Amino acid sequence: MFIGIDVGTSGIKVLLVDEAQKVVASHTEKLVVSRPHEGWSEQNPEDWWTATCSAIDALHASHPREVGAVRGIGLSGQQHGAVLMGRNNEVLRPCMLWNDTRAETECTVFERRFPQSRQITGNIAMPGFTAPKVLWVARHEADIFSQVRHVLLPKAWLRFRMTGDMIEDMSDASGTLWLDTGKRMWSDAALECCGLRLQHMPELCEGTAVAGRLNADLAQRWGMAERPVFAGSAGDNAAGAVGLGAVRANDAFISLGTSGVVWMTTDSYYPGGNAAIHSFCHAVPATWHQMGVTLSAAASLAWWSGIAGKSEAQLLAELPEAPQAPSPVMFAPYLSGERTPHNDGTIRGGFIGLSQSTTRAQMTQAVLEGVAFSFRDAVEGLAASGLSFQEADVIGGGSQSALWTSIIASILDVKLHRLAHGEQGGAFGAARLARIAVTNESVQDVCTPPERVASIEPDSTLNGAYRQAYLRYREIYPALRSIRTA
C-alpha cells in the first residue's frame, strides 16, 4: 500500500493506493487562505500539519489494515511558497503562497542583480516565485529576514515535520528561481542575489528517490508495521503529470481546470525565454518539461455563468455540438491577469465586438474560444523553444464538454484525447512516486497513462477562419494595456 498527500491551497488530500494502483480510499481536509492586504495570500504551515494528521487519522479509522500496510509515502505540493524558519526550526511568519503578488518590484530587483537568471533558471522572474518573496521580506521585514536559517517549500516543510529531514525534489525546486535547472543543482549566484547561501536550502534529490522515513511516533499512531519510506516526490503539476503517465519526451497534455496548463515533457533543458513559458525539471530523472499557464480557463466559463444567470450546462446546451464558425464576438480571459505569454497580474479581460444583435450563445462561444486562444498563446511560446506536438491528452472539468474540446483542437490544430480516469490529481502521482522509491521499478512500468475514451480531430474546414481570429485576438492585449495605462 502507498499514500499520496497533496498539499493544495484549498485543502490537504490524502489517497490510499494499493499494489494494483487502485485508489482504495481518500480523505480531504479543507484549508483557508488569509488575505490581509490586496495581493497578499498566506497560510499558516501548522494548518497543513494539522490537516494532514487529521486526514490520515480518518483513513486509519476507516481502513486500519490498509494504512497499517503502507510502505511508501509521496508528496505533491503547491509550488513557490516560502516557509521561513529560524534557528530552532520555528516558522517565522505565515507562508506567502504561489498566488501572492506583492513582490512585483522585487522581480525587477532580482533580474537586475542576476542578469543570467532567465538562462540559468529557465524562467522569467514572477511575483509568484519564491525568490522575489524572500527579497520582499528582506526589504520590508528585515528583522524577520535576519533570523532566517532555512527556507522550505510547502511540501518540504511537511516532509520535515513527518521525517525530520530537509529534502526537496527537482521539480518543486525549479519554481524557486534558485535552481540551475539545466544542471539540477542550486545556483550559488541566484541565492546570493537574495542574501542566502546553500546552507539555507534543503538537500536536493530526484522525485523517485528515497527521501526520509516517517517518524516512529507517527508510524505507531497510524498502526504501521514499518516506518514508510518517503519519495522525493513532486510539485503539483509534475505530480499530476506522473499520474497521467506524461513522463516520456514529447508527452503532452492540456489541463482545462480552473486555471489552464499546456504541458510538454522533454528530455533536454530548454530555457523558457521571454514568452512566460515555465521551464522546470520533471519529477523523474534526466527529464524536464515546459509549461504555459492561463490563469482563468474553466474559471472564465464559471464567471460568465454567474453573470448570465444560467448554469454552465444550460449555456453549453444553447450551442451546437461542434463549432460551425468562430463567434463574431471575442473574449479576453484575463479575469485574474495572465501568466503566459504576458506575465501581467494587473491586466483585465472583456468582450469585444458586441452589437445589438449579439446573442448569449455567441458570447458563450466567445468565452470558450478566448480560453482556447490563450492555450494557443502557450503553444506559440513552446514553438519559440523549437517544441511542438501533434496530439495531447486533455483533462480537467472543462474537458467534459465535447464542444469545448473540439474548439481547442481546431484552434490548436492538434488531435486531443479525452481520458477515462484523468482526474486523480497530484496525490495519485505522489503515490506512484512513493511506489517507485520503495520498489525501484522503472518509471515507464509504473507511470502508465489512463485509457483514452475519445479522440477529437481538428476541423480542417475551420483552420483558416480560426487562424484569422487568433491574429485578431493577439491585438486585444496591447489594446487593453494601453487603455489601462492611459
Image (cartoon, rainbow, N blue to C red):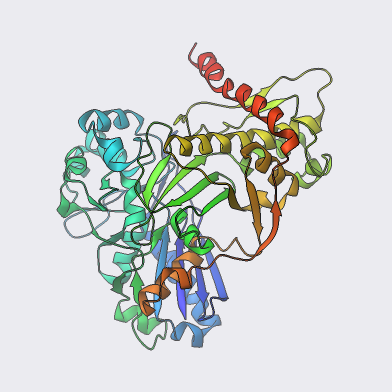
Picture coordinates of residue 197, whole percent (x, y): 15, 48
User: Left or right: 245 with respect to 114?
Assistant: right
User: Left or right: 436 with respect to 152?
Assistant: right
Position above or below: 302 against 173: above
State the residue at coordinates (57%, 24%): 474
State the residue at coordinates (83%, 41%): 320
Question: Between 194 and 233, which is closer to the camera in this rendering?
Answer: 233
Position above or below: 205 against 376: below
Question: Between 359 and 153, which is closer to the camera in this rendering?
Answer: 359
Residue 395 seen in the figure? no
Position above or below: 372 against 61: above
Picture coordinates of residue 451, whole percent (x, y): 63, 66
Residue 304 quadrant: top right
Residue 233 quadrant: bottom left
Picture coordinates of residue 157, whole percent (x, y): 31, 60
State the residue at coordinates (41%, 40%): 100
User: Left or right: 236 with respect to 451?
Assistant: left
How many numbered discs, if any?
0
Q: Residue furthest top?
A: 486
Residue 441 seen in the figure? yes
Picture coordinates of residue 367, whole percent (x, y): 69, 34
Question: Between 67 and 181, which is closer to the camera in this rendering?
Answer: 181
